[in-house]
Image (spheres, rainbow, N blue to C red):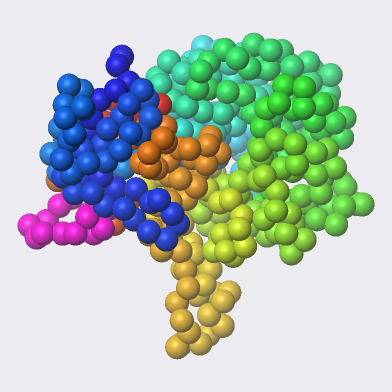
């Protein structure tokens, strides 16, 4: 397919965290898979390009889901209201049994086809995913994502302790299978790549962590894991690693905390002052998962504080710790979670306190350019950025008044679903 063409519509993006850029009834030029520019009148030199005329539809950058548990998608919408609702019960009743099913490659194919088909009809164009510990199923997920046109990082999960029967590797097996997976996938796909994925410290022995660190350096691949999601988790890590001062040091001692390769740490809800300092000064992206955090721990990460301190923050669905694939819903939840956090931790009961929470502009930025920065110039329509775009038809939710472009975007964040996604382009290729 030709990667040079033009989209016509109402173009929306966030060049920085505080501002929207709106271009009503304009032309967005893609040249060789990159953004060439935005024009009110199409220059003569581009008039030979094919024009996708989307009328007054909204054209937004593709969104980046920076934390997704692909094998958990099957039990989405369940598990948040079990009687004994601590995390171990959730794992033992839902997460681990469902992940265990992926030893069956035929099951994995059906499940991952369903996931990726559904993902195709969202605003998500790029994803960073945990697979399961099964190498073949992980490779299959990467293949399916590539075939459907996504850009992604996918991790074969490592677990050599504290799991259930049937979902536990020996230390040797964990490292051997990880290396075999890296050999098979490191350069196999143009836009789908491997990412080292220790599930979290409690599931990985020191031997596995050291081995993963060695593989990370040998193959120069990024890292993803979980950090300070729950107070019980933090206490458990302290029992396992009594010599550390804070959770992040458990990764840092293996050079897996943003010192050698780019790193994604999901959640960071209860990070200490020392941990926050490293998060803000290392090559780490904090994957904020507001839907999951509110469901699981009943609170939200201090996202505004991270952003103002210079941390790289992005958004994730954490499906199925969260219950949606919609990054529009996650934008809305991020704003809501920020309001809840302000009201209960920063307002201090003052009825006249100045409101201070995540605005729409910033939340939209986190879902697009904030996450996209993990790939480089991704998530915006600035010149030279990789061309990821989603076309949204908001006629289904429109009323009979003239609304500003900001209002149209705000309403789509609140109300849109897969019915409103009219077209999708990833890395310059039309995939929907």
What main secondary structure does the magenta stretch of the protein show? Answer: loop
Residue 129's place in the image compared with 79, above or below, is above
User: Which residue is found at the position 66% from the left and 40% from the top?
Assistant: 263
Q: Indicate whether residue 179 is drawn in magenta.
A: no
Q: Quadrant of the C terminus?
A: top left
- Name the spot of residue 250 as percent of width and height, x first: 82, 45
Q: Residue furthest left?
A: 400
Residue at 45%, 37% in the rendered image? 378
In terms of depth relative to the viewer, which is nearer, 186 or 239? Answer: 186
Q: Position of residue 155 (x, y in %)?
A: 62, 27
Up-down relation of residue 208 to residue 105 (above or below): below
Q: Nearer the viewer, residue 325 or 197?
A: 197
Can residue 345 be seen from the camera position used here? yes
Q: Tell me the quarter of the image containing the N terminus.
A: top left
Residue 103's image quarter? top right
In magenta, the rendered stretch is 396-409
Front residue of 91/172: it is 172
Q: Residue at x 27, y 41 (%)?
A: 38
Left/right of residue 345 with respect to residue 391 in the rendered view? right
> Is residue 137 shown left or right of residue 394?
right
Image-based side of 225 in relation to 371, left or right: right
Q: Residue at x 36, y 41 (%)?
A: 381
Q: Quadrant of residue 48?
A: top left
Q: How many marks?
A: 0
Which is more toward the observer, 403 or 47? 47
Residue 360 lies, with reference to residue 7, above or below; the image says below
Image height check: is 211 above or below 246? above
Q: Position of residue 143 (x, y in %)?
A: 50, 15
- Residue 397 is covered by the magenta coloring: yes
Q: Is residue 108 left or right of residue 389?
A: right
């Amino acid at each position: 397919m030709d990667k040079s063409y033009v989209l016509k519509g109402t173009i929306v993006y966030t060049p920085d965290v505080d501002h929207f850029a709106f271009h009503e009834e304009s032309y967005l030029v893609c040249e060789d898979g990159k953004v060439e520019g935005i024009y009110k009148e199409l220059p003569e030199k581009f008039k030979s390009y094919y024009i996708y005329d989307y009328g007054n539809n909204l054209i937004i950058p593709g969104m980046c889901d920076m934390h997704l548990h692909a094998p958990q998608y099957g039990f989405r919408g369940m598990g948040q209201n079990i009687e004994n609702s601590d995390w171990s019960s959730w794992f033992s009743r839902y997460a681990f049994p469902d992940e265990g099913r992926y030893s069956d490659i035929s099951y994995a194919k059906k499940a991952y086809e369903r996931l990726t088909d559904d993902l195709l009809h969202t605003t998500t164009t790029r994803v960073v995913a945990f697979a399961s510990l099964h190498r073949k199923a992980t490779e299959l997920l990467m293949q399916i994502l590539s075939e459907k046109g996504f850009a992604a990082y996918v991790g074969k999960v490592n677990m050599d302790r504290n799991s259930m029967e049937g979902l536990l590797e020996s230390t040797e097996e964990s490292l051997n299978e990880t290396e075999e997976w890296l050999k098979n996938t490191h350069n196999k796909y143009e836009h789908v790549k491997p990412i080292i994925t220790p599930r979290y410290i409690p599931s990985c022995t020191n031997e596995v962590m050291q081995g993963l660190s060695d593989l990370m350096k040998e193959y120069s691949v990024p890292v993803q894991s979980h950090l300070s999601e729950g107070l019980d988790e933090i206490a458990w890590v302290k029992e396992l690693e009594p010599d550390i001062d804070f959770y992040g040091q458990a990764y840092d001692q293996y050079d897996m905390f943003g010192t050698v390769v780019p790193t994604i740490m999901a959640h960071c809800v209860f990070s200490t002052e020392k941990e926050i300092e490293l998060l803000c000064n290392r090559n780490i992206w904090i994957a904020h998962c507001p839907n999951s955090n509110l469901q699981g721990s009943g609170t939200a990460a201090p996202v505004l504080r991270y952003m103002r301190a210079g941390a790289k923050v992005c958004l994730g669905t954490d499906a199925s710790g969260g219950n949606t694939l919609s990054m529009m819903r996650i934008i809305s939840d991020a704003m809501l979670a920020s309001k809840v956090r302000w009201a209960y931790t920063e307002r201090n009961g003052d009825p006249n306190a100045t409101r201070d929470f995540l605005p729409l502009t910033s939340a939209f930025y986190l879902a697009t350019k904030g996450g996209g920065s993990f790939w480089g110039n991704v998530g915006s329509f600035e010149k030279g950025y990789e061309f990821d775009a989603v076309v949204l038809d908001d006629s289904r939710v429109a009323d009979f008044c003239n609304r500003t472009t900001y209002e149209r975007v705000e309403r789509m964040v609140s109300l849109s679903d897969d019915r409103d996604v009219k077209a999708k382009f990833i890395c310059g290729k039309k995939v929907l």
